Amino acid sequence: MVNDCTTVWDNCLQSIRRNVPAQSYRTWFEPIRPVRLENNALTIQVPNKFFYEWLEEHYVSLLKRTIRTELGDKGRLEYQILMANANSRRKKEDAGVSVGANKGSSNGMGPGTVSTANIKNPFIIPGIRKVKIDPQLNQNYRFENYIEGDCNRLARSAGLAIAKKPGGTSFNPLVVFGEVGLGKTHLAQAIGNDVLEKFPDKTVLYVSSEKFTNQIIQSIKNNAVNDFVNFYQLIDVLIVDDIQFLANKQKTQEIFFHIFNQLHQNGKQIILTSDRAPKDLDGMEERLISRFKWGLSADLQAPDLETRIAILEAKMNREGVEISQDVVEFICFNIQNNIRELEGVLVSLIAQSSLNRREMDVDLAKEVVKNFVTEINKEITVDFIQKLVADHFDIQPEKLQGKTRKRSIVIARQLSMYLAKNLTDKSLKSIGENFGGRDHSTVIYSCRTVQDLMETNAIFKDTVTELEKKIKLSLNDK
């Protein structure tokens, strides 16, 4: 039966792949495993409850249609959720651990609880008393300015769910991982800010792994490790940034292990960020890695072109500036893998324009971008445009430079001139020379002809738009 269910699911995947974006397919369908096929019911295994709920909310029609295509009108789909209750999977050696809890029960407190009296707060300066713990959050990090795309949809959706019910979802801890500058810190702190808005009585704390380590060092020096552990047990939502820097720090990992256990056991939410997946965290104790896998590990990918443009335009709106579309696209074509750099380019562009009283055009953008990337993507050339247009119309590029008056070739030639004028910085004379030595008036006439056709022929306009995008994206992929 295993072979049968595998075959059926493979056939379903072939159909699904044609109907969803590639990133969505990798995120939501590749992790699924077929389990069995009985009585026209295909059972599939999904990683967790959140995964199941997302499929049911967004892809139920597609799945129903696909299953019935494979199994007939009586075909149905059943789910098997892989993740069980994390507490039930703990090793016996971890049961009953209550590090930092008060011994005995004379104070009426049971195991796993701590007294808030006389607990030192490592985040405040000695001698200055604060009643409420400062969450250490950046108020600018919000869900409203965290642009969603295929690159971050899983992580962002999980974050929103956590903010509605901190500690009460199946993905605890949430581990957000990805390369530098993709928005891990922004997302983690956005969750914290949202929790504080919805639940003002909750205690939220953001801490970098470096600060956490330094606090442990100080607590050891001051013989105050119990106070340190007890303080962290007061937190309802703990956010630890760049967890990979705890690698090879055995004492820090040991203390964090006990804090993690206590918080998780008491239903508190833990959010971690890392530059790599939990399984790739070298120098980390296996028992910690095992706990990181209890919840949801969501990776952040480099944003695609459309998402980068949306991010940059959102930043422009917040800054109250307007920049032409060609400048926006130029920046996004060249800054591909780092959102922080993308926003940095915009800030530098605004500063350069203001201080030097220069227009924010492509030339200024080129100067700014050179400070962020070692090599600007290859510029669009007339020759490159000719090759792509010729390929689209299935003709030889040399035909565009010849003297033939065949209508299909004339249209392709005029369209190539139009794209060359709009997508390169070449003069009309230079463009004409690339088309068999034609003069600038021919180029002007060709551009006007193409514009007229675009205004009267919707199909032709779509062709031009498609070619423009293809030219830019093809260069961007090189």
Image (cartoon, grey):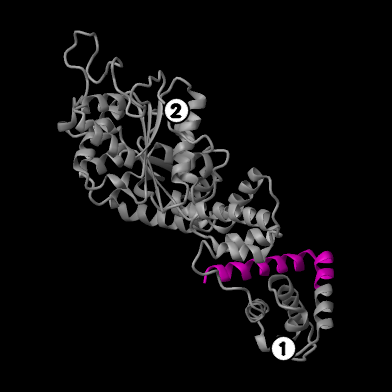
Residue 158 as seen in the image, left or right of residue 277: right
Task: Give the vertical position of 219 relative to 408 (above or below).
Answer: above
| Residue 454 is a magenta residue | yes
Predominant SS along the magenta part: helix
The residue singled out by tag 1 in the image is 401
At label 1, the amino acid type is Gln
> Is residue 69 visible to us here?
no
Closer to the camera in the image, 478 or 450: 478
Closer to the camera in the image, 72 or 22: 22
Closer to the camera in the image, 165 or 46: 165
At label 2, the amino acid type is Lys
| Residue 90 is a magenta residue | no
Residue 75 horizontal/vertical position (percent)? 46, 45
Task: Give the vertical position of 312 relative to 406 (above or below).
Answer: above
**Residue drawn at (23%, 46%), measured in percent from left and top?**
284
**Residue drawn at (24%, 36%), measured in percent from left and top?**
217
Closer to the camera in the image, 403 or 116: 116
Q: Identify the magenta region.
A: 450-478
Count of residue discs = 2
Residue 85 horizontal/vertical position (percent)? 30, 32
**Residue drawn at (51%, 25%), measured in percent from left and top?**
198
Residue 99 as seen in the image, left or right of residue 465: left
Residue found at the far left of this picture: 93
Disc 1 packing (10 Å; few <14; some 14–19; many ≥20)? some
Q: Where residue 464 is drawn, which disc sits there?
A: none
Q: Quadrant of residue 290?
A: top left
The residue singled out by tag 2 in the image is 165
Residue 332 horizontal/vertical position (percent)? 58, 59
Disc 2 packing (10 Å; few <14; some 14–19; many ≥20)? some
